[in-house]
Image (cartoon, rainbow, N blue to C red):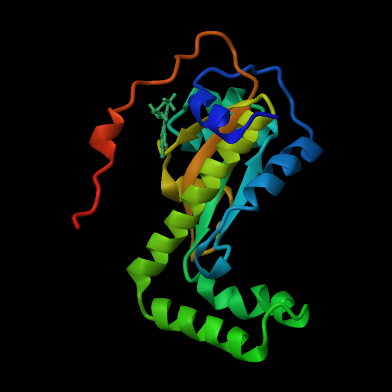
Amino acid sequence: MTDISSAINGRTSANNFDPTHVMTQAEILDLAQLANQTPTSFNQQNWRLVAVNTPAAKGRLKAAAFNQPKVGDAAVTFVVVGKIGGYKDLPTLIKPMLDGGHIDQAAYDGWIGMANGMYEGKEQFQRDEAIRSASLAAMTLMYAAHSKGLVSGAMIGFDSAAVSAECKLAANEVPAMLIAVGRPAPGNWPRKVRRAVADVVSFSAD
Ligand SMILES: Cc1cc2nc3c(=O)[nH]c(=O)nc-3n(C[C@H](O)[C@H](O)[C@H](O)COP(=O)(O)O)c2cc1C
């Protein structure tokens, strides 16, 4: 295990993966379990993962990802899927908190009411939320992989319709990102240069 600062400083985006590396379902679930701790707005958990880890499925996903070799070579490529309108699941999702006595009926009703007020009828905002949640989950997944001594590579280079068809996504689901995970092969670049922190942060005026 690495501490969080070391993980942040140590993670790089890998392009070359060991094509002989196979991950068990248990190992893949271990990563997913960590990614599943990602926070989401109202805890609506409007994202999920499709783990593509068999040779045939990897081949099809690679074709949908503009033939990026890492999709074929990595032990697993996760399709991080965002769900549009995920706030509609909240009555079910937060029911265990009501049943467990963590919140009372008024808090439960208020929670759902606030979410409905925020998202209802706002298609673009719902889609933004799907991408936002999936992106946060994707980052958690990359650090989860790093914590297990694996490397990862995020991808937006894919045909969205083809990936949706391959993964049989529902009409209200969108593939936000692909994350290849596995053991590295030689030749990966080091961490790319970042802007100076002073260029990234500004402070509020008094
Ligand atoms: C949302 C996102 C999409 C990306 N898409 C691709 C991709 O399709 N193909 C690729 O080779 N790299 C892709 N990358 C990798 C970036 O080029 C890489 O993260 C960036 O250059 C920084 O690299 P570093 O983390 O090693 O410093 C993507 C990264 C992100 C975060």
**Nearer to the camera, 5 or 153:** 5
Q: Quadrant of ligand 1?
A: top left
Residue shown at the point (67%, 87%) measured from the top left: 104
Q: Above or below — where is 107 with respect to 122?
A: below
- Apparent side of residue 148 relative to residue 17 in the rendered image (left or right): right
Residue shown at the point (54%, 82%) measured from the top left: 112
Residue 124 spot, x, y in % from top left: 33, 67
Residue 33 spot, x, y in % from top left: 71, 48
**Nearer to the camera, 129 or 76:** 129
Q: Residue furthest front?
A: 206
- Apparent side of residue 198 relative to residue 179 in the rendered image (left or right): left
Residue shown at the point (45%, 15%) measured from the top left: 190
Residue 4 spot, x, y in % from top left: 58, 35
Q: Is residue 75 visible?
A: yes
Residue 116 spot, x, y in % from top left: 46, 82
Q: Above or below — where is 173 with respect to 92?
A: above
Q: Write down the quadrant of residue 46 in the picture.
A: bottom right
Q: Above or below — where is 31 with respect to 197?
A: below
* Number of numbered labels in the structure image: 0
- Apparent side of residue 24 relative to residue 108 in the rendered image (left or right): right
Q: Residue furthest left?
A: 205
Which quadrant of the rendered structure holds the N terminus?
top right
Residue shown at the point (72%, 39%) measured from the top left: 28
Q: Above or below — where is 98 with respect to 44?
A: below
Which quadrant of the rendered structure holds the C terminus?
bottom left
Q: Write down the quadrant of residue 78 in the picture.
A: top right
